[in-house]
């Protein structure tokens, strides 16, 4: 009887230690949410999100997803509120890192718990894209000053991340040497190595700096008449995505506008003189026949999912070489949305330039994280096996119970921001004041959007998911010619 009690107690403790969250399939939850989003039923998508997050203490992912869903629904205010909550959590992380970097790095010496029970702090690219998306919400409402604040925050966040990751790399090397773990992701037989070694992944400087974010910063600073800040934004974007004509042209045009007073005037600031450290505002007369500088932003698809794959890994346990099946994360691409390479503007074809790929950033993040994941997973497996052997020596049934619990809870962390757009494409055009017609490809039902141009600088934002099109700001959608192309408008 005592043996049975001990066995059940060991199983109970093992399950409690791993935490209930190991049984949660975040990917499955978001598949349902995204199915509703792709069909245009945003209310159903929000209902699923709320059903799966009933606790009072909402996590970062909840606010990530809710902000994007509300943006698609047309509730820009609600979207900003959700994203401000997410930004607050990221800010706490930033402050903690600045205050005590070693404490944050100490996680690399903590191996007992499965990665799925670790507090989700967001991947670096998600933290940066959060403020970029918040800036787009504000630009949809022509709030360039508000967008400027979010852009400044993005640059500061990148600096914090860069410093932390440099220290993390050194810490990980020390821990790997200490634990004797030399396995690399390329050594994992059956692992899709090619996905992490693809040219578009290797070509990224890191996983968090986006050419789109920096190009957008250049556009916003230029619109506000701050050419001295616009140039570094465009320059950084060109550095992150070399040989891109759109980025090179932005710098050339900025140089011309500095010497040519006939270029568009800066947009009016809502809080002139209130911003600390603000450069003296440039006031330029706008000619009567002045065209507007319009940035068309098309965000399409959904961020890739993370899945778990089991791979046998040889480990030395108690002096013996044991082949142990362990779980590692892989990237699974979203195929819900066709690539949007061009649009039609006033009956003329307009090519789009891809400035951001969440897929590539996600794979780069995983590529950079894999050494740490392999280290934690390997050490955890060895520790678990030694513990199970010690229990077997005392009570075989107890050891069996722990082994069963370990098998049940074994799995890679599949959490990630799934409603985040996968691709961000842009086109920059000069348009005369008035209404212009923008048409999407026939694969999206040939959806037609009317754009009203009435400012020197404007941003037109479109979101495409499946065959759904969502327009924001100065754009409004006309009734689509094909029933399959359901559309919604953000106002």
Image: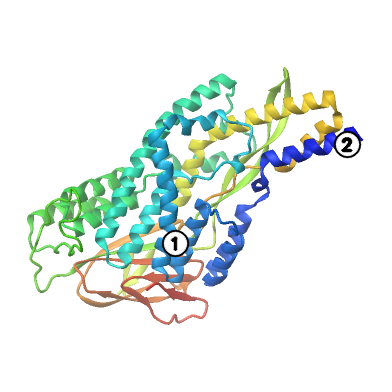
Residue 410 lies in quadrant? top right
Residue at 54% in and 59% down: 335
In terms of depth relative to the viewer, which is nearer, 476 or 387?
Answer: 387
In terms of depth relative to the viewer, which is nearer, 214 or 448?
Answer: 214
Q: Give the percent coordinates (x, y) of residue 264.
A: 14, 64
In terms of depth relative to the viewer, which is nearer, 8 or 454?
Answer: 8
Q: Is residue 60 above or below residue 458?
A: above
Residue at 11% in and 54% down: 258
Q: Are marks 1 and 2 in contact (CB under 8 Å)?
A: no
Q: Give the percent coordinates (x, y) of residue 373.
A: 57, 35
481 lies left or right of 229:
right
Q: Give the percent coordinates (x, y) of residue 201.
A: 45, 43
The residue carrying pointer 2 sits among few (fewer than 14), some (14 to 19) or many (20 or more) residues within 10 Å by Cα, namely: few
Q: Give the percent coordinates (x, y) of residue 424.
A: 39, 57
Q: Quadrant of the C terminus?
A: bottom left
The residue carrying pointer 1 sits among few (fewer than 14), some (14 to 19) or many (20 or more) residues within 10 Å by Cα, namely: many
The residue wearing badge 1 is: 300
Q: Residue furthest top?
A: 319
From the viewer's perspective, is the residue at label 1 or at label 2 nearer? 2
61 lies left or right of 74:
right
SS for tag 2?
helix
- Mark sitting on residue 321: none
Q: Residue furthest right?
A: 1
The residue wearing badge 2 is: 4
Q: Earlier in the sequence, mark 1 or mark 2?
A: 2
């Amino acid at each position: 009887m005592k043996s049975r009690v001990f066995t059940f107690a060991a199983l109970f403790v093992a399950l409690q230690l791993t935490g209930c969250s190991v049984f949660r399939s975040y990917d499955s939850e978001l598949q349902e949410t995204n199915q509703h989003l792709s069909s245009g039923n945003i209310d159903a998508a929000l209902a699923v999100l709320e059903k799966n997050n009933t606790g009072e203490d909402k996590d970062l992912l909840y606010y990530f997803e809710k902000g994007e869903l509300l943006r698609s629904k047309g509730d820009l205010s609600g979207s900003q509120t959700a994203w401000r909550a997410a930004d607050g959590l990221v800010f706490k992380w930033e402050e903690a890192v600045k205050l005590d970097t070693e404490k944050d790095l100490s996680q690399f010496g903590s191996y007992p718990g499965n990665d799925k029970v670790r507090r989700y702090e967001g991947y670096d690219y998600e933290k940066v894209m959060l403020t970029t998306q918040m800036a787009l919400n504000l630009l949809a409402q022509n709030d360039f000053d508000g967008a400027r604040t979010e852009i400044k925050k993005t640059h500061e966040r990148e600096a914090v991340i860069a410093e932390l990751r440099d220290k993390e790399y050194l810490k990980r090397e020390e821990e790997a040497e200490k634990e004797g773990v030399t396995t690399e992701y390329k050594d994992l037989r059956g692992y899709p190595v090619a996905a992490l070694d693809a040219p578009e992944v290797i070509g990224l400087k890191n996983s968090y700096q986006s050419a789109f974010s920096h190009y957008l910063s250049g556009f916003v600073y230029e619109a506000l008449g701050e050419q001295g800040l616009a140039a570094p934004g465009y320059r950084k974007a060109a550095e992150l995505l070399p040989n891109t004509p759109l980025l090179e042209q932005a710098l050339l045009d900025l140089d011309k506008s500095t010497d040519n007073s006939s270029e568009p005037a800066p947009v009016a600031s809502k809080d002139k003189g209130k911003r600390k450290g603000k450069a003296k505002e440039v006031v330029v007369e706008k000619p009567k026949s002045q065209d507007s500088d319009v940035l068309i932003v098309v965000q399409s698809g959904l961020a890739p999912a993370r899945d778990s794959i089991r791979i046998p890994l040889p480990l030395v346990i108690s002096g013996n070489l044991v082949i142990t099946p362990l779980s590692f994360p892989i990237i699974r691409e979203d195929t819900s949305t066709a690539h949007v390479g061009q649009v039609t503007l006033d009956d003329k074809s307009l090519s789009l330039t891809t400035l951001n790929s969440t897929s590539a950033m996600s794979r780069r993040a995983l590529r950079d994280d894999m050494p740490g994941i392999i280290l934690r997973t390997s050490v955890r497996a060895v520790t678990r096996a030694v513990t199970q052997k010690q229990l077997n020596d005392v009570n075989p049934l107890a050891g069996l119970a722990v082994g069963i619990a370990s098998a049940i809870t074994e799995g890679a962390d599949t959490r990630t921001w799934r409603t985040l757009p996968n691709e961000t494409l842009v086109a920059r055009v000069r348009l005369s004041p008035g209404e212009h017609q923008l048409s999407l490809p026939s694969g999206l039902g040939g959806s037609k959007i009317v754009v009203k141009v009435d400012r020197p600088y404007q941003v037109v934002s479109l979101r495409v998911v499946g065959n759904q099109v969502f327009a924001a700001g100065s754009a409004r959608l006309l009734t689509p010619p094909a029933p399959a192309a359901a559309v919604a408008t953000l106002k």
